[in-house]
Image: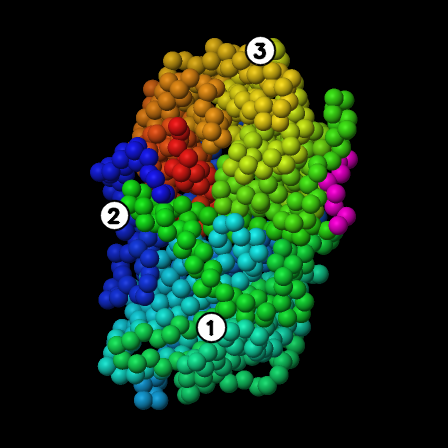
Amino acid sequence: MDCEPAWWKQLEDVSLNHPGDEDDNNLMQSWRGKSLGHNVPEHGWKIALSHKFKTKPTPWSFPPLTQIPSVLGLAVRYLQYYNQLRRKNKKPCMDFFNQNPLRPIYGVPLGGIGSGTINRGWQGDFCKWQLKPGIYTFDCPLADQFIVSIRRHNTVVCQQVLSTKGPSGEALRTWNWKYCGSYAYYNGLYPRAWTVYDLQGQNIVLTCRQISPVFPNDYKDTSLPAAVFVWDVENRGNEEVEVTIVMSLENGTGNPEQQKKVSGLWNEPFSNTDHNNKAKGVVMHNTTYRDMPYTLTVAAAEKPGVDVTHCTSFNPTHNGAEVWTSLLNTGRLQSKPGKSSLTATGEHTACAVAASCKVKPHSMSGSIDFALTWDMPQIHFGDAGKHYKRRYTRWFNGDNAGASIAAYALDNYKTWEDKIEAWQRPILDNKQLPDWYKSAIFNELYYITDGGTVWLEVAGEENGTANGKVPETSQKITKVDSYDFLKEYGKFAYLEGQEYKMYNTYDVHFYASIALAYLWPKLELSVQYDIATSILHSNPQPHKYLMDGVTAPVKTPNVVPHDVGCPDDEPWLRVNTYFVHDTADWRDLNPKFVLQAYRDYYITKDIDFLKAMWPICKIVMEQSMRHDKDNDGLIENSGAADQTFDGWCVTGPSAYCGGLWLAALRCMEEAADILHEKDDQVKFHDILGRATKAYQERLWNGKYFNYDCSSNPQHRTSVMADQCAGQWFLLASGICDVLPDDQVMSSLKTIFSLNVEQYDGGRHGAVNGMRPHGAVDTSSVQSDEVWTGVTYALAATMIHKGMLKEGFRTASGIYRSCWQRYGMAFQTPEAMRKNHTYRSLAYMRPLSIWGMQYALENPQE
């Protein structure tokens, strides 16, 4: 930030730590190395490879007895639904019987946006794969490793697999495993990571830098399925050494059940001389997924002083001698010429690529560069249906695309890093910002790529035409004029969570969308155009909703969909996977569409976008007015699951939905003024005046806004952490004149005092519901949870209002618990409790942390 506001001084000399943080959060205690490596940044998520997490959270399982009646009907209906799907050999989009276990092993994911991801864990394993859209395999193929071989005077003095793990059977038994993790550490700062290996007894320090092409406002390279590993070798000894780094990789994800059925895999060497450096390596062809063949490519840059050799194929279930012995004897790999033979059913194959260089005494080598790419150019969802091309195929397509991308990555990774540095440096160098925040703000962005994300080309036949019925006042609105935009920037979708497999879940995207709007605004507008088209669509197919057992259409026309589909079906065709309630009755979705549309315009200043959204905004607002039963301008909740807190039901006017409604009315008024729609401006101004009066009369209690207007005072007067969500969006849109400032400030201070500080001393963020006397609201399965994304959004709202100390302290509790105490790095959950339970690992909503950065750079005037 070029000009820091005066209220930055609030952060000076303020401790944002919590009691016991030093012991809980020192992930480098077991680090024993003597060198911190080459050009490793000061900030990031640092952890010794030998670290063991003391606290082991468990997944949320059964509610207490007092909460069982509220979920009993849902549980029975879900079990019936689950059994129906099992008979069809399918799984639900939310599979509560097969939740992902917490494995504290994940690191910065590899690759760009929307082309699949591979996760390389902080201990060096390639441990999570999402190549088929939205479908994850949690396997760690043993052969996926880096190996170092060091020679002095033409004799090997050290040859080591750079992994703390080892084989349990005969596979790769000839390799030297179990590197001592106390002499290696990891630093993750998305989209890059560093691993430093201090080779004891050798006076050699290796620094591996992992780079993925992710940086703001880029819509080409950021779509590439590629990552680069740059190795720097420091020779601290008195003799010249020859160092060889080997990258080995199995053909496939290592999933044993898949592998039993697969045959016909094959590998082939390649050499690309069309770029500055000669890229040499191996392309591996895989046919695991029906109609979606893909390749994995491992390549190294051959340049002056660096020699590249390879082993085209070896069986990773055997002892691995063909790789290990050749490397041991010569420091090089050897291979038969030509392609490998096709594998038999169940047979495994892998490849290895080696790069060698000499390093003089007391000096640093030139870099040794590897590239990994995965090319699955054409995809479909479910068992069949429409095929889509991924975004990157616009520039890289055909049989040799994987090799071409690898060569391109090796040529351009330095440019990628320059762009990453230019983006990150102002935040990292800002001395007022806490160190934990500098890790959190970038590392929470992992979900942009690792969220089952797809970024697809738009075919010519897609024109945004709706098949839904529209209100009589809007009969001419049958489509959204989005084709040219989507043709240029493509369709974008990501999952609500790696366990909640629904694309573009809109009530949750409401929180996460600030990351897209701030960093890749064209992708955010793409989502909005897509949702606008979906609003007009309908799907009259009857669907039984599990929360209340009611049968209603899959999608009612002219309301915002909950989501656009799941990976096992055809997204954008069915519209709405969620099984809890017909979205025609949801109270928060329609206002959230309006709020995002206006905020996105405010950030982008794209007047054409605002014009395209305006008639759709009018439609959804008109639909929402049906929920104003007493004509006071304020919508009411139904007492059922009708908003994002679907397990914490609301009756009558509510702080959350009512606040969103007021904010949406104000944005409609502002948009009408910009678009010179004077009649509509007057109309929405009038409704806003009546609604604001009703909101204050029905909900304001002198300190905060009551949760709702139910007859139960134990429910009604709860302090909701997210009651200012509408204000957050207004402040992000430059508007601060709806509710009196003293009411907003009083609410935020009450939330901070009760929901944050009195909940485990602020060590877990903000609990959703708190009773005014300081006890947690345990009336529902969600009121006593801390939602990570809500906590970050609350912190952003506080920062907008100048409460920097409170905002950072609120956010620090959830980050430190997830990332440092519990080992949830790169799998931030939706919800946590202070009893060390969690729900839904790897979730979309925590991307709301970028609302904090946006607030810092756009303070309230």
Residues 432 and 289: in front is 432
Residue at 39% x, 66% y is: 208
Q: Earlier in the sequence, mark 2 or mark 3?
A: 2
Residue beneath label 2, please? 23
Earlier-in-chain disc, 1 versus 2: 2
Residue 251 falls in image quadrant: bottom right
Instruction: Compare marks 1 and 3 and give the one earlier in the sequence.
Output: 1
Frontmost of labels 1 and 2 is 1
Q: Amino acid under label 3?
A: Asp
Badge 1 marks a residue whose secondary structure is: strand
Instruction: In the rendered structure, find residue 805 and report the number of the disc placed on it.
Output: none
Say left or right for 238 vs 88.
left
Which residue is located at x 54 percent, y 67 percent? 408
Instruction: Identify the image quadrant of residue 97.
Output: top right
Residue 256 visible from this viewpoint: no
According to the picture, the residue beneath numbered tag 3 turns out to be: 632
Mark drawn on residue 247: 1
Q: Which residues are magenta?
A: 460-467
Mark 2 nearby-residue class (10 Å; few <14, some 14–19, many ≥20): few
x and y percentages locating residue 399 in the rendered image: 67, 69
Using the image as rendered, state which of residue 386 and residue 466 is in the foreground: 466
Amino acid carrying mark 2 in the image: Asp
Q: Position of residue 586 (x, y in %)?
A: 61, 27
Question: x and y percent of residue 501 in the render?
Answer: 59, 45
